[in-house]
Amino acid sequence: MPTPVKMPQLGETVFEGTVARWLKQPGDPVQRQEPLLDITTDKIDTEVPAPAAGFLLKILAAEGTTVQVGSVIAYIGDEAEEITEDTEGPGESVASRKEADRTAPSLSPARRTRGADSDAKPQGRAFVSPVVARISAEHNIDLDEVPGSGRQGRVTRKDLLAYIETRQQRPPAAQPASGAAPGEDELLQPLSNLRRAIAEHMSRSVRTSPHVVTIFEADMTAVVRHRAAQKEAFARKGVNLTFTPYFVAAVAAALREHPTVNSRWTDAGLVLNQRIHVGIAAAVAGGLIVPVVRDADELNLQGLARTVNDLADRARRGELSPDEVRGGTFTVTNHGTSGSLLGTPIINQPQAAILGVGRISKRAVVNSAGSLSGAPVDPLLPSADDTISIRPMSYLSLAFDHRILDGFGADSFLSDVVQRLENWGA
């Protein structure tokens, strides 16, 4: 029997992939684990190996086609084997999904119809993807209430997200007519697969988690001094010492003391991650990618610096493997590297929080030494004994899921991070 080639799962939050290039054509012989095609997602570009040896019998997803994770995109088998409808199995095929898309209105995904077999009641919604099951559970949605556009009325992820938007009864944003050309003074810039995927992931995160942001200010004097003293020694070992590893180290240590921040939400309860894997947001051509520093709490500063640099460099070159962009339990985004003072980042689902790091810049800081005369003085009131010094300061912003954390817990965690930075080396 022919072996199906499926769109692989390349990350916890990756739900679809785009076929970039087929490396084999129908009729070509293939070996097991031989590169078969290139795919792109919102996180990485990667090769997909052949799951079996034989001949590439049929391609179901042409180059440029975006399909859901788990969808059959090709078949491999003996040269004499043929592909029949029975071979494709009970799952939603690429062809049926495309047919559903063609019959759907172009302006509103919420008005999508089921097609010819829409009157057939699905058998208890038996065939739903894990993604659909998880999203429906998060939003407490009965799938029997959701119109499905898939085969035999199966509910797809797009159907479910459209239903959620409709249920929230948000006023529809003004849209141009379908297929409307840009005006004389306008240019239409096509969206890349990466940009579309980022847009979908960010929108879903805001819909899923009630975001709250808390902001602290950190005195980076101790870190700046330590880096200045160690930078040349690190360079002799081939390591460029930036500020990012310091933040990762402080976060990893604080996560050990605040395990709830290192968790994710489920309707059954909080899943507390027993290992600390810190994602590092890295800007790449056309978007953003988040490679993961695994077991960050077990690495010293040199190990963190080496790992962060390696991941960032290979992210920009598009050389990360799927395992290097999945499994993160917390994310750090150092937007200060581009000059930003303050940001309110969006949570990288399904994590509980994300830390935004602002630019380190010199600011005037009031130092209250109390009253030299011994008289009681409120520290918030100006005193003749106060002094002003110039310090390297940074704003740290923590965006957190209010379902998981309350303000006190989030503030306690961020205060811990700040204290570790301000007392670096002490």
Image (tube, rainbow, N blue to C red):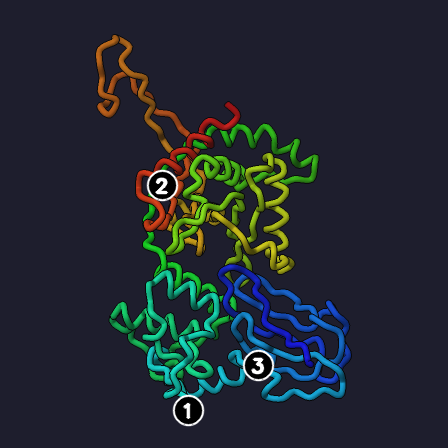
Distance from the alpha carbon under mark 3 to that under mark 1: 19 Å
Residue 389 in view of the camera: yes
Image coordinates for residue 56, horizontal then vertical, percent: 71, 80
Task: State the quadrant of the N terminus.
Answer: bottom right
Image coordinates for residue 82, horizontal then vertical, percent: 69, 88
The residue under the point 69% across, 70% down is: 51
Q: Nearer the viewer, mark 2 or mark 1?
A: 1
CB under 8 Å between discs 3 and 1: no
Image coordinates for residue 260, horizontal then vertical, percent: 41, 43
The residue tagged 1 is: 116
The residue under the point 77% across, 79% down is: 29
Distance from the alpha carbon under mark 2 to that under mark 1: 51 Å
Q: Is residue 207 above or below residue 278?
A: below
Q: How many marks?
A: 3
- Mark 2 or mark 1: which comes first in sequence? 1
Element class at badge 2: helix
The residue tagged 2 is: 410
Element class at badge 1: loop
The amino acid sitting under disc 3 is: Gly
Q: Nearer the viewer, mark 2 or mark 3?
A: 3
* Mark number, residue 293: none
**Front-lying residue, 237 or 117:** 117
**Front-lying residue, 405 or 225:** 405
Element class at badge 3: loop
The amino acid sitting under disc 2 is: Ala
The residue tagged 3 is: 89
> Which residue appears farthest toward the bottom when viewing the image?
116
